[in-house]
Image (cartoon, helix red, strand yellow):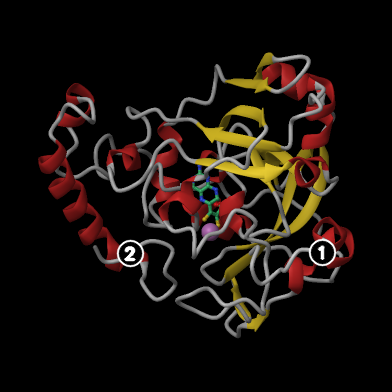
Amino acid sequence: MKKFWHDPSIRASDITPETVYINRRKFLQLGAVALGSAALSACVDRPALVNPVPTELSPDPVYPEGVTDELGDALTGYKGITGYNNYYEFSLGKEEVARLAPRLQTSPWEVRVDGLVQNPKTYGIEDILARFPRQERIYRLRCVEGWSMVIPWMGFPLADLLKEAVPLADARYVKFTTLKRLEEMPGLINPAFPWPYTEGLRLDEAMHDLTLLSTGLYGKELPNQNGAPIRLVVPWKYGFKSSKSIVRIELVKEQPSTFWSSIAPQEYGFYSNVNPNKAHPRWSQETERRIGELKRRPTLMFNGYEKEVASLYTGMDLNTYY
Ligand SMILES: Nc1nc2c(c(=O)[nH]1)N[C@H]1C(S)=C(S)[C@@H](COP(=O)(O)O)O[C@H]1N2
Ligand SMILES: [Mo]
């Protein structure tokens, strides 16, 4: 099968027909049993086009002029951040996600924190918002495909939540699971992917102060296309590590298998730290296109967070563990 995912040389408008083709073919092969016939029968022909939703994006929120990240880079505009998204549960078309995501019901919402912890607990999203004070964090986000943004997130360190859970001595990794709800997420119909979307971090990466659980951006609640009501943000790793719309955070002993590493481990390794010196097998990672800019710019080691995080990887060969 042709590799159509995560490829900067293929535009959203180019892949849609093939995606639909693959959906149809796989659906016919696998039959309705594997996929759930009732939910599918209405949308197998045009999975991305059922239940039209409003196309209007929110206008830019009012925000102070001249705000930058710590390197002096300007914030990416609200329209860019909320109109150009990777969120395969909705669509492989980056500009289509924002049109489809509003149908996701984000309330009520529960997040289960369990596994190797002293205090397993299911939080309602409102408990989380009340319990963990939110801060603003302006982070660069670098997608493995070679584009980037500067995003003013609102959120709180994942460590705050993990400390409340109290990891047991043999907990070494954290596994994140995204919601899988076929009725509201038309991209799940694509059987080429191992749903639900999962991700993972080593426990010390998860406890690092830069690692955020985000519930908002630009001073507003998180738009669905950005992973409402709660998503991970790990700014020194490629964007796919930052899983959206999380329903479970599980402490585990062994390195968990993850969505992208199970699809193509040689292309999307577990660590996937941003590294301009380590080319992706199909393209260079030396430069990136900042959304809203024309010229490409150099990609920075650890996405510019080297000082903060390099010590996590002492003794590891960064060209192997990428
Ligand atoms: N559940 C889920 N999380 C996801 C993705 C996805 O398809 N599904 N895409 C990832 C990728 S590849 C990137 S680059 C970022 C994009 O986040 P943004 O749309 O908020 O900029 O989300 C990541 N988190
Ligand atoms: Mo990405």
Q: Is residue 54 visible?
A: yes
Q: Which residue is drawn at 57% across and 43% down?
A: 199
Instruction: Say if 199 sits above or below 11 in the image.
Output: above
Assign the C terminus to one quadrant of the image.
bottom right
Left or right for 199, reference 305: left
The image position of residue 234, as x and y in percent, is: 71, 51
Q: Residue at x 56, y 45 (%)?
A: 226
The answer to whether mark 2 and mark 1 are in CB contact below 8 A is no
Nearer to us of marks 2 and 1 is 1
> Going by the picture, which residue comes out furthest to the bottom?
295
**Res. 315 mark:** 1
Binning the other alpha carbons within 10 Å of mark 2 as few (below 14), some (14 to 19) or many (20 upward) gives some
Instruction: Say if 151 sits above or below 250 in the image.
Output: below
- CA–CA distance in space, label 2 to label 1: 35 Å
Q: Nearer the viewer, residue 291 or 114?
A: 114
- Which element is circle 1 on? loop
Q: What residue type is labelled 2?
A: Phe
Q: How many marks do you count on the picture?
A: 2
The image position of residue 78, as x and y in percent, is: 62, 55
The image position of residue 123, as x and y in percent, is: 67, 16
Q: Is mark 1 within 8 Å of ligand 2?
A: no
- Which element is circle 2 on? loop
Q: Is residue 74 visible?
A: no
Give the residue number, with chain letter if any, for mark 2. 4
Q: What residue type is labelled 1?
A: Gly
